[in-house]
Image (cartoon, rainbow, N blue to C red):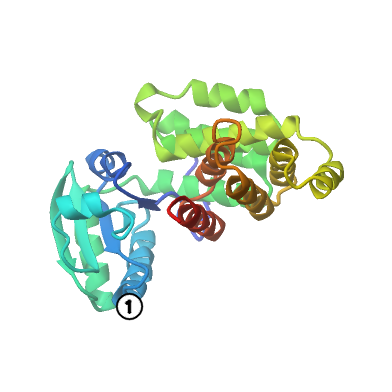
């Protein structure tokens, strides 16, 4: 049985907040809300009140400790779902549970009312097993601190208690990757229950595994830099340079090279630069500033 004593309750919550849009709203909100309530924040970059409400909502959702999740939708980029839900002004916030909207409000709100709203929505899902949630947070903290072996043990213990925990399966796979055990990580992902195969935590782990496999074959970083400097249109060398940069831990540098490759020839190798960018983004947390900045730059190139 899992020991739920000292689980590092001060560790940050994970996988609670993500960006979504027209293509993934059904999965991120409708399907996800059948398990836990989901709050959807409809916003836009130019909206002043959104810049205050969004962080306040995120803080309240994080404080709820996994009893509710949050999805953010940029209405400028996702007019389809905004239109379907009749979002006429922003910020607009909807709460979903069991696949349907159950509550909501428009406009900025005081922090106290935001927290009351989040707690009210969270209560729709009943009481969560806070012990398991705390254990997952502790395991994530262990990974950040470089204690991958301990993290793997904790993730495995959570799986013994909850065999459908996508966060635990994804975390265990990432722990194996941190230990250099890529075959073991692949085994964990392939052995997960089918019903959680498409969960965000699983997709992120799959993306990270793909990148780790590529890193095994990455060429010497300095040699690749020389190749690209000698011929800026050597697209394969630039792609390989991005792979080597990612393997070295320079994720931002890897994204930069892939964006440059996309700018030079977006159709090269059947759109390999764009596909690789999405793999890198998927491997990061949706709220990671590097991922958000990279997605914005890619979108500006696509729609230019």
User: Is the C terminus in the top left, top right, bottom left or bottom right quadrant?
Assistant: bottom left
Q: Position of residue 166 (x, y in %)?
A: 42, 35
Q: Position of residue 51 (x, y in %)?
A: 36, 73
- Read off the residue under disc 1: 48
Q: Position of residue 194 (x, y in %)?
A: 38, 22
Question: 147 or 252, which is in the foreground?
Answer: 252
Taking 173 as reference, is 120 left or right?
left
Crowding around mark 1 (Cα neighbors within 10 Å: few <14, some 14 to 19, many 20+) is few
Q: Position of residue 188 (x, y in %)?
A: 54, 25
In this view, 255 is above or below 76: above
The residue tagged with tag 1: helix, strand or loop? helix
**Quadrant of residue 89 within the rendered picture:** bottom left
In this view, 27 is above or below 89: above
Question: 125 or 213, which is in the foreground?
Answer: 213
Residue 174 visible in rendering: yes
How many marks are shown on the rendered structure? 1
**Quadrant of residue 73 within the rendered picture:** bottom left
Taking 211 as reference, is 91 left or right?
left
Name the residue: 34% across, 60% down: 61
Question: 201 or 43, which is in the foreground?
Answer: 43
Residue 172 visible in rendering: no
Name the residue: 82% across, 50% down: 229
In this view, 21 is above or below 178: below
Name the residue: 26% across, 56% down: 40
């Amino acid at each position: 049985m899992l020991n739920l004593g000292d689980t590092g309750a001060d560790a940050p919550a994970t996988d609670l907040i993500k960006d979504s849009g027209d293509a993934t709203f059904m999965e991120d909100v409708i399907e996800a809300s059948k398990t836990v309530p989901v709050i959807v924040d409809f916003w836009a970059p130019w909206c002043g009140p959104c810049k205050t409400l969004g962080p306040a909502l995120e803080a309240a959702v994080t404080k709820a400790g996994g009893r509710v999740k949050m999805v953010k939708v940029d209405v400028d980029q996702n007019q389809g779902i905004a239109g379907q839900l009749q979002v006429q002004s922003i910020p607009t916030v909807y709460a979903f549970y069991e696949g349907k909207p159950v509550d909501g409000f428009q406009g900025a709100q005081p922090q106290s009312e935001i927290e009351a709203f989040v707690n009210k929505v969270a209560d729709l899902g009943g009481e969560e097993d806070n012990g398991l949630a705390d254990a997952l947070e502790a395991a994530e903290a262990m990974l950040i601190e470089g204690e991958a072996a301990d993290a793997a043990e904790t993730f495995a213990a959570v799986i013994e208690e909850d065999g459908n925990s996508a966060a635990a399966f994804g975390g265990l796979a990432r722990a194996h990757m941190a230990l250099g055990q890529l075959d073991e990580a692949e085994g964990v992902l392939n052995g997960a229950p089918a019903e959680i195969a498409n969960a965000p935590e699983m997709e992120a782990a799959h993306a990270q595994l793909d990148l780790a496999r590529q890193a095994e074959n990455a060429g010497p970083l300095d040699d690749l830099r020389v190749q690209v400097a000698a011929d800026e249109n050597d697209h394969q060398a630039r792609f390989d340079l991005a792979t080597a940069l990612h393997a070295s831990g320079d994720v931002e540098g890897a994204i930069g090279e892939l964006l440059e490759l996309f700018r030079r020839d977006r159709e090269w190798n059947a759109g390999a630069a764009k596909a690789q960018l999405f793999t890198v983004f998927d491997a990061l947390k949706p709220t990671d500033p590097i991922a958000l900045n990279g997605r914005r730059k890619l979108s500006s190139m696509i729609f230019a």
